[in-house]
Image: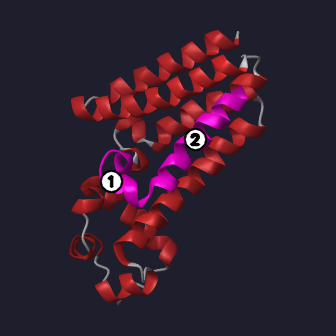
Amino acid sequence: MKTVYERADIVPLLAEIFRELGYEGTSLSRITERTGIGKGSLYHFFPGGKQEMAGAVLADVDGWFEHAIYQPLRKDDADQAIAAMWTNVNDYFCSGRRICLVGAFALDETRERFSAEIGDYFIRWIDALRSALMRAGCPEGEAQTLAEEGVAGIQGALVLSRALDDRMVFTRALDTLAKRLDAVMR
């Protein structure tokens, strides 16, 4: 019996392949090999090929972050939204075992293909966190600096955790960042 896929079913599979192999290392042959989905089916869902697939993955990641991270930071109680951000980020990145695909794309020539999406992801995260920090009483300039430090700290912790193959590096970094922001808000 043949499995029938919807485009939305394929995107998470593609995300993990791009995470593992990077944009340049991902080919249609490797996607077919790892998913069992034929090239014809892939082109049916993604007529633009690999670039459209990566764009769909970035849009999916963006949708998750918009719903789980950015919107709460912009609209919910600041303390609760920031606390939820740490939990949700830890869960999303599997305690540092899962790389940030957007961050990985930002580090190589893939950045040129998706510069708008990559820049927007980080700008919106920083802006949402800055907004929550300001609602918590932090002055705008300091909130901007702390938001940049928080997002940069998360990204750096992901890299270090993977490089050292120690997920506790990520967990400790999130705890330290959370305590730093909490201390500033008190």
Q: Position of residue 79 (x, y in %)?
A: 71, 24
Residue at which label 1 appears = 19
Name the residue located 69 percent from the left edge and 14 percent from the top edge.
185
Q: Position of residue 119 (x, y in %)?
A: 51, 47
Choose between 2 and 179: the one closer to the eye.
179
What count of labels does the image hold?
2
Residue range corresponding to the magenta coloring: 104-132
Residue at which label 2 appears = 123
Labels 2, 1: front one: 2
Q: As drawn, is 124 to the left or to the right of 135?
A: left
In the rendered view, how is the structure colored?
A: secondary structure
Q: Is residue 96 above or below residue 139?
A: below
Q: Would you say the magenta stretch is mainly helix, strand or loop?
A: helix
Callout 2: SS:
helix
Q: Is residue 132 above or below residue 46?
A: above
Choose between 120 and 33: the one closer to the eye.
120
Name the residue located 51 percent from the left edge and 23 percent from the top edge.
149
The three-letter code of the residue at mark 2 reads Ile
**Disc 1 crowd, CA 10 A, few/some/many (<14, 14-19, 20+):** some
Q: Is residue 162 magenta?
A: no
Choose between 57 and 96: the one closer to the eye.
57
Disc nearer the start of the sequence (2/1): 1
Q: Is residue 61 above or below residue 140?
A: below
Q: Is residue 18 above or below residue 142?
A: below
Name the residue located 42 percent from the left edge and 22 percent from the top edge.
173
Q: As drawn, is 115 to the left or to the right of 21?
A: right
Q: Position of residue 39 (x, y in %)?
A: 30, 84
The three-letter code of the residue at mark 1 reads Arg
